Each structure stands twice: as C-alpha cells, then as structure tokens.
Amino acid sequence: MKFSTIIFLLFLWNSTYRCADDEGLIKCNRVSKNILGTWKGNQNSISNSFNDSFTLEITSASKCKFEGKTSYSKSSTSYKVKGTIDMYGWVKFREVEYINDGGEYTDCTLTETECQKVRWQTGTLFEKAKYNDSEFSGSWKLEGINTTSGNSWNGMVLKLSGKFNLQKLN
C-alpha cells in the first residue's frame, strides 16, 4: 500500500510540475516567424530501401500551424505539406497532396505488393521532432490501406518508416 501511494504521489508531483513549467512552452508568434524559409536535410528508411536528401520549404505559418512543400533530389515528385507545432515544441507535418507527380507510384507497373513499397505516395507523416530555430529531426512513416487481393484483412498497414533531419538554410 505504501509503495502504490508513493508511486501515485510521484506521478502527481511530476504532472503538476510539468503543467506549471512555462519555461518549456513555446511562443507561437515567435516560432511562426522563425520556421518560415527553406530547410534541407535527409531521410532514410529503417529497412535502408529508401535514402534521399530533401527540402522542406515553409511558405506560410500562423498560430503554430504551417504550410509549404517538400521536394527530393532523386525525384521530380513534390508535395504540399501541412503541419503543426504543439505548445511544447513538437513538430508534426504531412505530405497531403502532389504538387508535381513524378509517376513513381501512380504509374507503377510492378506487382501491387511492390508498388505499395514505393516511397513516392502522399500521406507521409513526419513526427516526433523537437523544434529548434536552426534544426530538428524525428521519424517519418507512410501508412496506407492494405489492398493485396488475396488478403482477407484490408486495414491500415505501415508501408515504410524511417528517420529524418532538417537544417535551416535561411
């Protein structure tokens, strides 16, 4: 009983402390101004099937929400991006639609299973990145609907995932 009381008190103390800590919170007006611009970096998949440098160009930001585009060195495909930064500085953004479709995925002539592994699909989520005015890094994942014909289970599956890093250019 004593042990569970101590654990409960530690939990309560930690959560109260975090809620009262204004020093760890970001200022959306400042971050929205500073995140604008061009960010360059790399991303690679955990399986090492994908590795490419990419550019995130943030063209508008307000109230900890931002929009822009991503482009890649090994493809003409580019995406419209929408993202957010939470009050603790965690960045999350998604490639929501094609700006330019290079055809690697949409014109794929491989088997359906192989085409599902092509990185150049919309919907990739970049997350778990702590914002910094000059750089941030985190993980990315591409999920989708399992459409394999012979499979009786058609649900969301993780197609690809990996790590990324970005540094601000201007």
Image (cartoon, grey):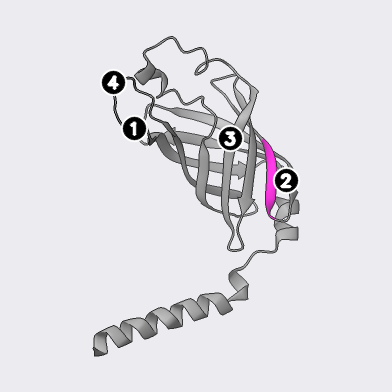
Residue reaching furthest bottom? 2
Q: Nearer the viewer, mark 3 or mark 1?
A: 3
Q: Nearer the viewer, residue 170 or 164?
A: 164
Q: Nearer the viewer, mark 1 or mark 4?
A: 4
Q: Nearer the viewer, mark 4 or mark 3?
A: 4
Q: Is 43 on the left or on the right of 99, as rendered?
A: left
Q: Amino acid at mark 3?
A: Glu
Mark nearer the N terminus (4 vs 3): 3
Examine the image and state in which quarter residue 83 appears: top right
3D distance between C-alphas at marks 3 and 1: 21 Å
Residue shown at 25% from the left, 85% from the top: 3
Amino acid at circle 1: Ser
Q: Mark 4, mark 2: which one is toward the viewer?
A: 4
Q: Of callouts 4 and 2, which one flags the residue occurring earlier in the amino acid sequence?
A: 2
Identify the residue position indicated by label 4 in the image.
Answer: 150
Report helix, strand or loop for mark 3. strand
Q: Amino acid at mark 2?
A: Leu
Residue shown at the point (25%, 90%) measured from the top left: 2
Q: Is residue 57 magenta?
A: no
Q: Are marks 3 and 1 in contact (CB under 8 Å)?
A: no
Q: Which residues are magenta?
A: 64-68
Of 9 and 77, nearer the camera is 9
Q: Can you give x and y, in whole percent of width and height, for residue 148 in the image?
A: 34, 22
Q: Is residue 87 above or below residue 85?
A: below
Above or below 33: residue 17: below
Which residue in the structure is indicated by mark 1? Answer: 47
Using the image, tell me which numbered label, if any, was put on residue 95: 3
Cα distance between the residues tagged 3 and 2: 17 Å
Q: Secondary structure at mark 4?
A: loop
* 60 relative position to 86: left or right: right
Residue 82 place in picture, x, y as percent: 64, 41
Q: Secondary structure at mark 2?
A: loop
